Image (cartoon, helix red, strand yellow):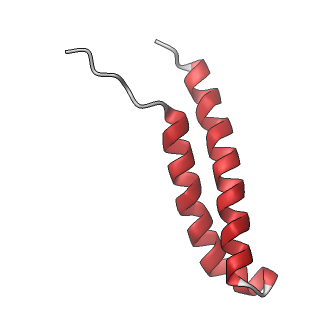
């Protein structure tokens, strides 16, 4: 059976969203004084870096 493999970019974005939620709830109140701002910034950065590193990993490990 030829199973289509999920790209690592998708995994990177999912991990980025989880990182953003954790970062925002833990450090949002401490650093920014607002949990919502911390969550938004964390998710935004997590998605951006997750997609970038996931696509780089996909390019290096083509089969």
| Residue drawn at the location 71% of the way across and 74% of the way down | 38
Q: Quadrant of residue 9?
A: top right
| Residue drawn at the location 41% of the way across and 31% of the way down | 6
Q: Quadrant of residue 32?
A: bottom right
| Residue drawn at the location 61% of the way across and 79% of the way down | 25
| Residue drawn at the location 53% of the way across and 61% of the way down | 18
Image label count: 0
User: In the image, is 15 to the left or to the right of 5?
Assistant: right
User: In the image, is 33 to the left or to the right of 14?
Assistant: right
Q: Assign the N terminus to one quadrant of the image.
A: top left
Q: Position of residue 40 (x, y in %)?
A: 69, 68
User: In the image, is 24 to the left or to the right of 61?
Assistant: right
Q: Is residue 37 above or below residue 58?
A: below
Q: Is residue 31 above or below residue 7?
A: below
Q: Position of residue 5 (x, y in %)?
A: 37, 26
User: In the image, is 45 to the left or to the right of 55?
Assistant: right
Q: Position of residue 61 (x, y in %)?
A: 53, 19
């Amino acid at each position: 059976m030829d199973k289509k493999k999920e790209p690592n970019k998708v995994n990177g974005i999912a991990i980025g969203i989880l990182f953003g939620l954790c970062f925002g709830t833990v450090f949002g109140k401490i650093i920014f004084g607002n949990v919502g701002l911390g969550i938004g910034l964390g998710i935004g950065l997590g998605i951006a870096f997750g997609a970038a590193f996931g696509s780089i990993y996909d390019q290096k490990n083509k089969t």
